[in-house]
Every structure is written in structure tokens, then in C-alpha cells.
Image (cartoon, grey):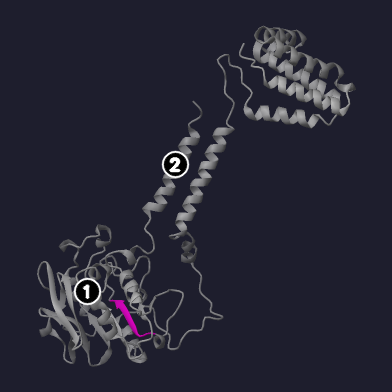
Amino acid sequence: MRNAGPILILLALVGLAALAFFGLSRDNDFDHSPLGNKGLQVWLEAKGIPVVRSDPHLARAGSELSLRILSLPISEGETAAAAGDEEKGNAGFEDWASEALKQGLPTLITMPKWHASLLKDGIAGPSDLLDLSLLQGELDKIDFSGLRLQRNGQGFESEQLGLSPDRSGRVSLYQAQTFDRTSLPEGCRQILGLSSGALIVRCEDNEYVDLLSDPDLLNNHGLALAENAGFAILLINNLRALNDKGPVYLDATGAPLDDTKPVDEGRTYERSGSDLERFFAYPLSVIWGTLFIVVAICFWRGFWRFGPPLKDASGNIELSKSAAIEATARLLRLSGNDGRMVSEFVLHLLADKAQLLFGPGAGNEAGIDRLFKRLARRDHAAAQALHSSAQALIDRGHLMKRADLHRNIETFRKSLGSIDFGSG
């Protein structure tokens, strides 16, 4: 059996490629997870509502947007609100509220509800819910002081909700998370709510900021339930600015907005290691993985095809295929050179064959004669043809013209290839 080293190397390389492809999460895993909002984007666009997503390399202007949707940040590691590797900057609720008031931009800020474990589990359950005390602590830090969160028991809660006399729809939420109406601060009112509590709250000191208690009203998990998708369209249209031609901004970074529309020409960006990482992000990671596997297969195949020569039972080393190719190439090269070189080469080649069969001491005229006698016992005609062509090249090669030399070399090559020398 040939050396198993190349096979082990190949298996290791393929294993590393598979680990890189399947073991590392894709950048858009969050968007397509139950807690992501890719479904909201696709659904809004299908209904003719333009959508733009946050980009760390591009600042948006509030004047070109009709609605901004963000998630209230919670202590790192406690929630799945942040999308993938994108991290929210230092901006928080107060900064977003100030921008909304300054630019007149309707802003919907959603409270978190689920642990990051839901990204792996894929199925929402009671154990995946964030602790209310943690959420309450974060809620107390913002302007809605005194506002309390509550959950309304096990199972689903479904109700017909109306945003206006001509805009209503049915909403279904799993373990609905609402605000306690009795805890609404002074100057704040309910914009949308269930019978058990308020879903969206707005305060008089900033009419452009709405706080949503349950993110399942807009995420992938919630949109797949009952008629929530249809109600989401009604809600978004109701919250958008008067200039409803602007896109809805799904903001996963919370970066500050520009006061005016940014100009792309001449824009410069600060480069970092994350820019290089994008070359290995999905779907480019699939291309790199494919190339990696192809290179590994080519390496293995090349090593296997032209590997080291094998030893026979007597300990002699057989001529490998690469050596045979080299000998044929040398014959062809010599066909245009001095015939004496051809004569010497043929003589040495026959001596090598004799040594392979009869041992190191057989590389002489007697050994060559013994070789032809042995070949004649197997196939007299083939041995005679080989002997005639070889003798002609050895004795008269230096006297032949180029055409005759080439013809005799070709005859010798064909005769040599047709004979099975066997083993000693």
C-alpha cells in the first residue's frame, strides 16, 4: 500500500474546511433567526414600503427616512437584541430620543424579551424569556421612569386591535409582554394595547418616540403567527412620518444620524481588521472553502500519481513512470543530435535492463547477450526485432543520416515497449 501520509493530510484539510464552513456562524444568522427582522424587511418591500438597513460604513440622514426602528440595549451577553457581530455604539435611548425630536423622525424603540439561547434553540419556550427584573432595571434608566413591565401568563394571547376606525387587525403573542397601564408616567399615554396591558407607549415631551413592550410584534418569530404580518403593515404605516415616501430604517447599530443627507463622493472611511474579515464572510467563505478543497485534492492526486518508486521482492527499485517518461523524452531529443550519443544511450539502456534482471554484475556485453537469449525464449520474433534495431543503432548510429536515425529510434522504442521483461 502506498504511503498513507497524503490521505491523512487530505482528510485533515477537508475537516478544517468543513469546520470553517459549518462551525462558524454566518454574519446574517441573526437576521434569519426567530429574533431577526429579515422577514419584516421582505414583507414591507413586498407591500411597496421601501426599507434600508444600518451600515457601519454609511451614516443616514433623518430627513430621508420615514421611521426608525431600534432595540433597547441590555447588558452584553444577556440578550439577543444585537444583530450578529454588529455592536451598538455608545448611543442609547436619550441620544435616539434627542435625534428624533431634533429631526422630527418617528422612532420606535422595542424592549427585548428573549435570551440569546433562542438563536440556537430555534423554538421559543419559557426558559428562553429574559428575567423581568433585568428588563425593569434597564427601563428605569430611561425617561419612562416608573413604567412597569409585565407578562400575561402562559400560552398565546390573541385580540382584535384597532389603530383607527378603518385600520384594525388581529394580533397573537406568545406570553405577551406589556406595560402596566396603572404605572404610566404623567404625560404618557397608550398608543396600542391589549386588554391586559399597553403595547406601545408615547409621552408628551417627545411625540416622535414610541416604546414597544413586545418585540414579537415585528420580529420573524411573531410575524409568522396568526395575522401578525398583516397587522405589522398597518402599524408601520400608522407610525411613519407624513412624508411616507421615505424608507423604513431597520437600525441594528444605533449610530448617530446625520443632520443632512450625506454626500457619497469623496467619502473616506477608517479601515480596520473587520474590513479584511468581510473577504471571508458568507457567501465568500463558500468560495474560499471550495478553492481550499480543490487545492487539497490536486495536491493529493499529484503526490499519489508521481509518488516514490516501489521496491520489488528482490530489493531492486523499479523504474517509475516518471523515469520512463524521461527516457522517452531523451530519445526524442537525441534524434536530432549526434548518432554516437544515441548508440551510447541504447547500449547503457540495455545494460540497465540486464542489471535489473540479473543483478549489478550483469551490466556488460555478456549480460546484454544473456538478456536477449532470455527474451528469445519468451517471444523470439519480438526479441529478434529489438535486437536488430538496437544493434543497428549501436554499430551504425554515428554513420546514419538524420532521417534514418529517427526511423531506427522509433523502431527501437516500439520494440522496447512491446516486450515484457518480467523479473529475475
Q: Which residues are magenta?
A: 65-71
Residue 280 painted magenta: no
Q: Residue 148: x, y in percent?
A: 15, 79
- Dot 2 falls on a residue whose secondary structure is helix
Q: Horizontally, is 198 left or right of 265 in the view?
A: left
Q: Residues within 10 Å of mark 1 (few under 14, many from 20)?
A: many
Give the residue displayed 58% in from the left and 16% down from the top.
Answer: 315
Residue 70 painted magenta: yes
Q: Is residue 110 in sight in this rendering?
A: no
Q: Amino acid at mark 1?
A: Asn
Question: From the viewer's perspective, is the residue at label 2 or at label 1 nearer?
Answer: 1
Q: Residues within 10 Å of mark 2 (few under 14, many from 20)?
A: few
Q: Which residue in the protein does label 1 denote?
A: 228
Q: Which residue in the protein does label 2 denote?
A: 12
For the residues labelled 2 and 1, say whether their Cβ atoms are less than 8 Å apart.
no
The mark that comes first in sequence, 2 or 1, is 2
Q: Residue 41: x, y in percent?
A: 34, 73
Q: Horizontally, is 402 left or right of 199 in the view?
A: right
Spatial CA span between label 2 and label 1:
48 Å
